[in-house]
Image (cartoon, rainbow, N blue to C red):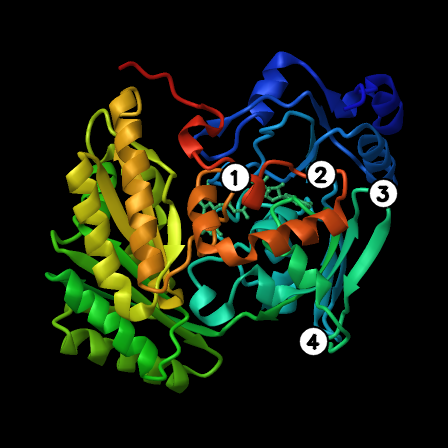
Amino acid sequence: MGKLDTSFIRRLVGENNVLDDPADLYIYGSDSSVHEALPWLVVRPQTVEQIQDLLRHANEKGIPIIPRGSGSGMCGQSVPIKGGIILDMKAMNRILEVNVKDGYCRCEPGVVDDDLNLALKPHGFFYPPTPASSRIATIGGEIANNASGVRSVKYGAAQDSVLGLKVVLANGDLVSFGATTRVSATGYPMEKLLVGSEGTLAVIVEATLRFVPIPKFRCLGVANFNDLDDAGNAISEIMASGCQPSMLELMDHVAITAVNKAMDLGLPDVAAILLFEADGMVKEAVDYEIDKAKIICEKHHGAGVELSYKEKDRTRIFSGRKKLFPALSKYKEFLSSTSLADDMAVPFSRMAQTARKIHEVADKHGIVMTAYGHCGAGCMHTKILMDTTKKEQWRAAEKAVAEIYEYVHAVGGTTSAEHGIGLSKAPAFKIEKQSTLALMREVKRAFDPNNIMNPGKLMDAPDNWVSATRLRYSTTE
Ligand SMILES: Cc1cc2nc3c(=O)[nH]c(=O)nc-3n(C[C@H](O)[C@H](O)[C@H](O)COP(=O)(O)OP(=O)(O)OC[C@H]3O[C@@H](n4cnc5c(N)ncnc54)[C@H](O)[C@@H]3O)c2cc1C
């Protein structure tokens, strides 16, 4: 590996856009995961040409390059496990075009999701992946992670919105993938290959995205279940009925308890809550969808059903789910919420069983786990609530994570629904994708023969996430 020529890099991007202060390196050494590892340098490029020159230099010297958006990834995707340069993409945040006539927009990767949606709103459109982190997550980070959100059940994930990409390859070449049109049957869809690549193939420098009309009507419903299985049965029947909800969210008892403690919302003390929404341009069509979901919930003993079109009521009904993530750390004193087996996807019919399995495994290992998520898309989120100061709790979490993923794979599920792989989920990912790992390594080699792009991730990540990096927690025996 060659020497890092910081004077070349400073001349390239300007003194103010290179950070090497230990405090900055510390900040950029972690994301929203449990992992941390220090980079050698942070570089904030302003132009595509600067990225091309920097990558040529890094490729020649074998210096790792880790693209980074806002660092909200939950699995250590942007943690520089092999050191190297963090490429902070947030300064490249221009919306280049909103083309309503042709139904696409173009933007730089550092644009924050909410900002893109603010620009689309006056035209009557929105960009649908919208993760819960949309206030901070960048378009580049969302594409590289294949992010999605509460409305993915109807509107899909980032992969469904990407029409084209411009990327800088490890050797500095700038290439264009995809098209601006809705359909394209021109060989390998390379733009889709970059979706979910977690910075391991190339740097995304421009995205062409489709958008969809903002619906005129939204109706949100809520139903309470005393039995998790009833909620699970309602989920599969709604999805099998041809009903098209725009949201179908599950909250389990742990999640309900945490929200009540944190926010005093007075949510009912039940085994599960389902939130369901329908949206559309015609009220009668929305009525039809929401009534169908309501009838199915009631058939499966969903009680206290409430429906509302009014924004104020919808905000109230949804407030517990919206604040769930921070609320989880309030569940019990000394227990912190950690993103470990943080998400997975399972078939609709296995949703309740998986939630029960998660509770069972948590009890067995003396930790607390919650199950919630965008169940209409098959997405199950979990968080491990544990005393992060205790080494034995980390060992318990490690066993629990492995057992949960073994179960998820056995019922036909997959390791990540939307949060990606990074480091924390790499062991489970490698087990699930065993038969394709060699091919994935070949693809990586074709893009990045010197292995400079976010090395040590996905198929090349360590098999043990606890010892993969320093953890962002101090522990005692
Ligand atoms: C409170 C909270 C709620 C969340 N809710 C959701 C949710 O509902 N749905 C969801 O999907 N996720 C969610 N997340 C996870 C996270 O916000 C998403 O994964 C998001 O897409 C990450 O965007 P980012 O800009 O922070 O990317 P980062 O974390 O900075 O990077 C993520 C990955 O993308 C790569 N990358 C970034 N920019 C580029 C680029 N220009 N070119 C190539 N690779 C690049 C990085 O190398 C890294 O591998 C949540 C996170 C938090 C903290």
Q: Is residue 247 above or below residue 181?
A: above
Q: What amino acid is at disc 3? A: Gly
Q: Is residue 88 above or below residue 287?
A: above
Residue that mark 4 sits on: 182
Secondary structure beneath label 1: loop
| Residue 423, horizontal then vertical, whole percent | 49, 38
- The Cα atoms of the two marked residues, 3 and 4, are separated by 29 Å
- The Cα atoms of the two marked residues, 3 and 2, are separated by 14 Å
Residue that mark 3 sits on: 172
Q: What amino acid is at disc 1? A: Ser
Kindly report which numbered mark, 3 or 1, lies closer to the viewer in this rendering: 3
Label 1 neighbourhood size at 10 Å, few (<14), some (14-19), many (20+)?
many
Residue 53 vs residue 122, the one in the foreground: 53
Kindly report which numbered mark, 2 or 1, lies closer to the viewer in this rendering: 2
Please state if 311 lies on the left or on the right of 111 as rendered. left
Label 3 neighbourhood size at 10 Å, few (<14), some (14-19), many (20+)?
many
Residue that mark 1 sits on: 72
Q: Is mark 1 within 8 Å of ligand 1?
A: yes
Please state if 415 lies on the left or on the right of 48 as rendered. left
Visible residue check, residue 313: no
Tell me if label 3 and label 1 are in contact, CB under 8 Å.
Answer: no
Tell me if label 4 and label 2 are in contact, CB under 8 Å.
Answer: no
- The Cα atoms of the two marked residues, 4 and 2, are separated by 33 Å
Q: Earlier in the sequence, mark 2 or mark 1?
A: 1
- The Cα atoms of the two marked residues, 2 and 1, are separated by 24 Å
| Residue 90, horizontal then vertical, whole percent | 68, 38
